[in-house]
Image (spheres, rainbow, N blue to C red):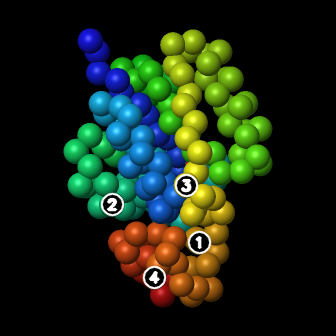
């Protein structure tokens, strides 16, 4: 039987405890989980693609079936290249739903073999986003409950 490979795509600018929770849980469900950092030009990123990947590698290094990669291609093309059939996405609130439905439907149309799996946020992190964390860090707020130590350190490096 072929390996069940899933891709968890996102900006991860930077990775938060909410992302990490999804990564831990998704890694248990698949043979291999590829955390794929989108190199999107539309969003003004705080961390470079390399920095975002580096932080993800640091915080997922203990998970043997998790791989960190970057992509700039159309997601479904990237999936074909990686021989992956499942996209993992996290849902926090109703407000996530509309966008996620649109993306999942578009991807389903582009490649009917690709299935999107949604995982509900851990209620502990339902309010947590990379944007909130950046906003807090910018004003020197305490982010230690929201991101792994390595990320808190990297944020201090950006904002002083
Ligand atoms: P994108 O720009 O593609 O939305 P993000 O890095 O913001 O990338 O998020 C990647 C994925 O992780 C999305 O599916 C998002 O809904 C999910 N996610 C982000 N924060 C959380 C959280 N606190 N709990 C659960 N899922 C989350």
Q: Earlier in the sequence, mark 1 or mark 2?
A: 2
Give residue 50's position: percent from left, percent from top: 38, 56
Q: In this orientation, does residue 11 appear?
A: yes
| For discs 3 and 1, the disc positioned in front in the rendered view | 3
Q: CA distance from mark 4 to mark 1?
A: 10 Å
User: Could you tell me if the residues under marks 4 and 1 are in contact, i.e. CB atoms within 8 Å?
Assistant: no
Residue under circle 2? 59
User: Does any atom of ligand 1 lie closer than 8 Å to the CB of label 2?
Assistant: no
Label 1 sits on a secondary structure element that is helix
User: Can you identify the residue that label 1 sits on?
Assistant: 134
Q: Closer to the camera: disc 4 or disc 3?
A: 3
Q: Is residue 147 left or right of residue 97?
A: left
Instruction: Kindly report the distance in space between the C-alpha atoms of the residues bearing marks 1 and 2.
Output: 18 Å
Residue at image location 22% in from the left, 45% down from the top: 64
Disc on the earlier residue, 4 or 3: 3
- From the Cβ of disc 3, is ligand 1 less than 8 Å away? yes
Identify the residue shown where x is 40% and y is 69%: 148
Residue carrying label 3: 122
Tell me, yes or no, whether the two marked residues, 2 and 4, touch with CB atoms within 8 Å.
no
Drawn side of residue 155 relative to residue 121, left or right: left
Quadrant of the image occupied by residue 83 = top left
From mark 4 to mark 3, how far is it between C-alphas? 26 Å
Q: Which mark is residue 13?
A: none
- Disc nearer the start of the sequence (3/2): 2
In this rendered view, identify the residue nearer to me: 4 or 43.
4
């Amino acid at each position: 039987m072929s390996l069940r490979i899933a891709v968890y795509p996102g900006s991860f600018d930077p990775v938060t405890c909410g992302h990490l929770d999804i990564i831990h849980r998704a890694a248990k469900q698949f043979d291999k989980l590829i955390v794929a950092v989108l190199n999107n030009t539309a969003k003004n990123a705080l961390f470079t693609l390399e920095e975002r990947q580096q932080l993800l590698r640091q915080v997922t290094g203990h998970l043997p079936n998790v791989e960190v990669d970057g992509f700039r291609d159309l997601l479904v093309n990237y999936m074909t290249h990686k021989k992956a059939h499942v996209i993992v996405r996290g849902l926090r609130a109703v407000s996530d739903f509309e966008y996620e439905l649109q993306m999942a439907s578009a991807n389903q149309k582009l490649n009917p073999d690709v299935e999107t799996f949604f995982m509900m946020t851990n209620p502990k992190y339902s309010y947590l986003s990379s944007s909130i964390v950046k906003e807090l860090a910018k004003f020197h707020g305490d982010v230690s409950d929201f991101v792994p130590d390595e990320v808190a350190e990297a944020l201090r490096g950006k904002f002083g």
